[in-house]
Amino acid sequence: LCSRLVIPGMAERQSGVILNIGSVNGLLAIGESAYSAAKAGMVNLTQNMAIHYGDDGIRVNLIAPGTIRTPIWDERLKAEPGAFEQLAPWYPLGRIGTPDDIAKAALFLCSDDASWITGVALPVDGGLTAGNYRFNKDLQGVREKPAT
């Protein structure tokens, strides 16, 4: 891991942030067993590093992106042009994420504004991990908002 190389200097300064990038697949059972197991391992590694290095002033967190439009997806869309239209309804915010969505979360977690946050797996997923929106919507037949 790259972390091995930076931890000694961070510990010496009693300050540092390690940000891992995982996937919502590490938080939910949504298929792709080997990939999901590896991403779940990243969540556990992040939590273990957070408790192990916290007293060295090092914060360790993870971003768990949902579907993000990347060049890999652009290639896939050439073969499956309607893929995003099929995926978007699964996200309560109704859209596929962008690299900027991940970058903004990363900037926050690495900033002093997050100075008391460590060991967190932050879903940046348009609400996908909040619950099964599409199932609920399909089951109800109409979108009902909870009473406030």
Image: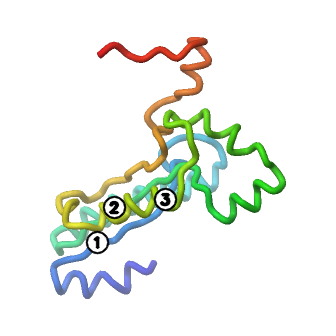
Badge 1 amino acid: Val
SS category of the residue bearing label 1: strand
Q: Indicate which disc residue 142 carries.
A: none
> Residue at coordinates 49% horizontally, 59% vertically from top-left?
22
Q: Indicate which disc residue 61 carries.
A: 2
Q: Which residue is mark 3?
A: 22
Q: Earlier in the sequence, mark 2 or mark 3?
A: 3
Q: Is residue 1 left or right of residue 80?
A: left
SS category of the residue bearing label 3: loop
Instruction: Identify which residue, 1 or 109, lies in the foreground.
Output: 109
Badge 3 amino acid: Gly
**Cα distance, mark 2 to mark 3?**
10 Å
Q: Which residue is mark 1?
A: 17
> Residue at coordinates 17% horizontally, 73% vertically from top-left?
57
Number of numbered discs overlaid on the protein picture: 3
Within 10 angstroms of label 2, few (less than 14), some, or many (20 or more) residues? many
Q: Residue 14 in the image: state x and y as whole percent.
A: 16, 79
Mark 2 in CB contact with mark 1 (< 8 angstroms): yes
Q: Residue 143 in the image: state x and y as whole percent.
A: 52, 17
Check the image and name the residue furthest to the right: 79
> Residue at coordinates 65% horizontally, 43% vertically from top-left?
31
Q: Quadrant of the N terminus?
A: bottom left
Instruction: Identify which residue, 45 or 100, lies in the foreground.
Output: 100
**Cα distance, mark 2 to mark 1?**
8 Å
Badge 2 amino acid: Asn
Quarter occupied by residue 46: bottom left
Q: Would you place residue 137 above or below residue 95 in this image? A: above
**Cα distance, mark 3 to mark 1?**
16 Å
Q: Quadrant of the C terminus?
A: top left
Within 10 angstroms of label 3, few (less than 14), some, or many (20 or more) residues? many
